[in-house]
Structure formats: C-alpha cells, structure tokens
C-alpha cells in the first residue's frame, strides 16, 4: 500500500513540475508572442485604464483625458487642438502617437521607470504610476500670433530664443484637431481617411518635417561665408559683380528682380536681394568653405531632435561652379526647414553662436516633482562674432532701407531678410515666400526672438 502511495505522490509531483514548467514557458518564453497577438487587448486596456499625463504651455494644460466608461477607458482631449497640433501631435487609441505625444509617451502614459517611487517598485507591487507632465518652451502669445498671422495660408512659422535655443513658437497650416483621432469610433476612422486624403496634408508638420528651397534667405549664410573667408572685407566696397551674371561654364545668364545690382556693394546687394552678387560670391568663396559654413549653421545634420526628429536641411557639397552659384542663392539642391532658417537668424542675433533648438523645458511627475530638465546645451560657432555683428547691421538695413520694410516694429530694432524661392519643373510652381528675422526691444541688451516664416501657394510681391 505504501508503495502505491509513493508512486501516486511521485506522479503528482511530476504533474506539478510539468505545470510549473508550462507556466514558465507561457509567461517567459511565449510572453512576447502573446503580447504581440492582435487578439490580446490586455495591454491596451491597461494603457488606457488611467488618465494620461499632460502637455503644458505657459503653465497651462493644452491636453486632458476624458473618461469614456468603456474598456479603453480614458480618451485624449485637446484644448486649441489645431493651434498646438504641430507640437503635441496626437495620441489615438486606433492610430498610435506622434510628435511630443510619441517621444514622451513613456512619461505621459506612466510607463517610464523614472516615475516609480523606488527602483523595481512597480515590478514587485504591480502598481501603475500616474502619467507625468511635459512642460514645453512654447510662448502662448507667440504661438497664437504666428498661427493667426498666417491667416489661413499654407505655410509654417518657427521662432526661437537666440540666447538659449528655446523654441517659442512652432506653427504649421493648414492644421487639424488631434482630438478627432483620439478614440476608436467610426468617426475617428472617417477623420483619419479624410485627413490622409487631403491634398493640403494638414497632418504634415511643415515647420520641422518639410524642407523648402530657402531662396534669398540663404543669402545670410552666403554673406557669412564671404565675410569669414575674407572674400568681402568692406560692406560698402563694390563687389565687381556683372548684371546679368553668366554662371561659370554655361551660357545661363542669371538676372535680378531689383535694379542697381551691377557691381553693388554687399550692403546694397543684401538690401536689394541681388541674385547676381550672391551667386558670384558663392563661387568666389568656393564649395568647400560654403559647405563648411552651411554645416556650421546646421545644414546636412540628420541627428537633430527637439525631442522629435527634424528633417535634414541640405547644402550639396558635390556641385560644380555653376550649381554652386545657384546653391548660394538658396536654389538648386539647397533645402531647409523653417526651424533651420530660424536657427540661422538666431545665430546672427546671438553673436555667431548656434544653440541647438529644444522644445521641452522639463518633465515632472503628476504631483509636480521634477523628473528631468533641459539643462545647459553646448553651442557651436557658425561664424566669427565680428561677422555676426556685420550681418546684424545688414539685416537691420533690409528692414530700415530695403525689401523688409513691413517688418518694422515701433519700439524695437528688427533685422530681416526676404526671400522668394522658385520650385517645380522648370520653376513653374508659384514661388514660396520667405522671411527670416530677429527682434530686440529698445530696453533689451540682446535680441529676444528669431523667426522664420514660409508661405506656400500664394504669389507674393517683394514688398509684402
């Protein structure tokens, strides 16, 4: 009898071991397979079981969470959704996350281990952290002014603080309301299809994810290269530039929209935006020094994050002399995001130093305690301080005496550079209209803001 009991006990022990081994196989070996199975809704149910942390602008929450009472309980809400969509992106139960909602998802959803009170605390207790908050660098009044200033035009605005790199405004139009995508209803599905089918691409963040030929605004970079290389030493000396200018090795004659560009000084050429002068200057500087200066400003950098990625602005270093002439006036293969051109203006305003732009001031727990701050960021020299000082003088002349007169602001010193950029097959597209600038209040010791604006699809007179 005892022998039978021992056999039964051994068999039960064997079954127990098999059960433990199988449980371990399911929970450890096959866990990723079950987690990734589309039929498994547990991760989604857990993810939306609590309110999401918020994104703040000027101390105010521009996002929120709504209790739907459904399995996917909390749904994202947005205040002034179209205004802040180029910053927040969307957080959708059906379509995932974009922009800040994506790059800061771990913190906002509460999954970031930094939110736990103690290391491994959640692993032991099975608790879920409340979502943390993201405090942005955006200035509410600047954001609204930029959005309203575009006035329904297709385009973008980027504004940065020259002394720090803080992004003060980031606008893209046409925009969309990210709240319409938050849920998983049929309405969200219809909205997704409508937005993706819209030829105006309202979900495209034109301020950081689209590059344009910068046109004459790139002449700021060309002027910096010419001054740093010693090709130009006196702002008021003749540049020995013909009008028209025949591009080297070709019969193509480059002309100007403005009069008085023949042999114009750098000051006159900058104020009148003379293509012939700047194309010749770029050729005289040479492709190596032109490319080096452009890259010092941030061109050809595909690593920029603010924290979401920024499209690479380009200056082609494999061009011949004729192509270099066109590249030096912001045409040919030269392309830039509005944020990149705002950084160019900021480098002029900041004494030649480029501060990497950033959008997140700090992150914090739901109770307000600090998780991380932006901290100090290293700068790099785009041009000599003396060159920056002379470029500030030239940009100020554009507003006071040249093509940028409409940018003048009472009680402030403003520097700027206008630009129109040809595009399309045979330059058949309606030119893009550009303006880059910086502004300094009469009581300020240094410029407080640098701005780049681009407008698509509407012919712009030079004086506008």
Image (tube, rainbow, N blue to C red):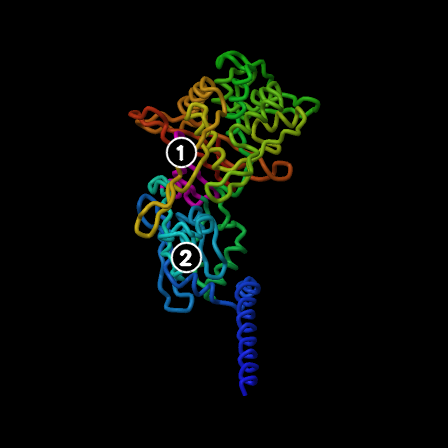
* Residue closer to the observer: 189 or 74: 74
26 up-or-down from 353: above or below: below
The residues bearing labels 1 and 2 have C-alpha atoms spaced at a distance of 34 Å
Q: Quadrant of the C terminus?
A: top left
Q: Residue at x 54, y 88 (%)?
A: 1
Answer whether residue 168 is magenta in the image.
Answer: yes
394 up-or-down from 204: above or below: above
Secondary structure at numbered mark 1? loop
Residue range in magenta is: 145-171
Q: Residue at x 37, y 27 (%)?
A: 447
> Which-is-in-front pick, marks 1 and 2?
1
The label number, if any, that marks residue 376 in the structure image: 1
Q: Is residue 429 left or right of residue 361?
A: right
* Residue closer to the observer: 277 or 376: 376
For the view shown, which residue lies furthest in the bottom direction?
Answer: 1
Secondary structure at numbered mark 2? helix
Q: Position of residue 45 (x, y in %)?
A: 44, 65
Q: Position of residue 109 (x, y in %)?
A: 41, 55
* Residue closer to the observer: 100 or 18: 18
Q: Which residue is mark 2?
A: 179
Pointer 1 with pointer 2, Cβ within 8 A: no
Q: Residue at x 33, y 50 (%)?
A: 61
């Amino acid at each position: 009898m005892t022998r039978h009991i021992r056999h039964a006990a051994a068999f039960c022990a064997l079954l127990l071991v098999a059960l433990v081994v199988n449980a371990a196989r399911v929970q450890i070996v096959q866990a990723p397979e079950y987690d990734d199975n589309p039929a498994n809704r547990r991760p989604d149910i857990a993810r939306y079981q609590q309110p999401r942390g918020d994104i703040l602008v000027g101390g105010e929450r521009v996002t929120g969470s709504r209790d739907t009472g459904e399995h996917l309980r909390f749904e994202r809400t947005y205040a002034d959704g179209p205004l802040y969509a180029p910053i927040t992106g969307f957080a959708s139960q059906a379509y995932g996350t974009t922009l800040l909602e994506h790059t800061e998802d771990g913190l906002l959803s509460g999954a970031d281990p930094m939110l736990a009170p103690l290391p491994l605390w959640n692993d032991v207790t099975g608790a879920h952290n409340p979502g943390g908050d993201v405090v942005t660098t955006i200035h509410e009044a600047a954001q609204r002014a930029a959005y309203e200033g575009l006035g329904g035009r297709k385009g973008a605005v980027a504004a940065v603080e020259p002394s720090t790199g803080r992004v003060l405004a980031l606008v893209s139009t046409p925009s969309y309301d990210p709240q319409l995508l938050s849920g998983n209803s049929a309405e969200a599905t219809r909205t997704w299809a409508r937005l993706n089918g819209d030829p105006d691409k309202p979900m495209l963040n034109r301020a950081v994810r689209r590059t344009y030929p910068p046109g004459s605004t790139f002449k700021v970079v060309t002027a910096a290269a010419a001054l740093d290389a010693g090709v130009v030493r006196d702002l008021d000396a003749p540049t020995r530039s013909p009008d028209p200018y025949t591009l080297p090795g070709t019969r193509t004659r480059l002309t100007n929209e403005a009069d008085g560009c023949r042999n114009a000084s750098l000051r006159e050429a900058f104020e009148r935006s003379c293509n012939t002068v700047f194309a010749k200057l770029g050729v005289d500087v040479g492709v190596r020094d032109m490319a080096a200066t452009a890259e010092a400003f941030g061109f050809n950098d595909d690593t920029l994050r603010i924290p979401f990625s920024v499209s690479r602005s380009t200056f082609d270093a494999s061009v011949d002399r004729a192509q270099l002439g066109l590249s030096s006036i912001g045409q040919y293969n030269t392309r830039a995001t509005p944020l990149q051109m705002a950084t160019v203006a900021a480098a002029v305003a900041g004494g030649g130093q480029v501060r990497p732009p950033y959008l997140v001031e700090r992150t914090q727990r739901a109770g307000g305690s600090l998780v991380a701050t932006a901290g100090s960021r290293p700068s790099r020299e785009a041009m000599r301080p003396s060159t920056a000082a002379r470029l500030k003088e030239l940009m100020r002349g554009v507003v006071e005496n040249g093509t940028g007169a409409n940018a003048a602001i009472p009680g402030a010193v403003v520097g700027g550079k206008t630009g129109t950029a040809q595009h399309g097959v045979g330059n058949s597209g309606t030119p893009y209209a550009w303006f880059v600038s910086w502004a300094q209040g009469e009581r300020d010791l240094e410029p407080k803001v640098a701005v780049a604006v681009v407008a698509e699809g509407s012919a712009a007179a030079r004086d506008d």
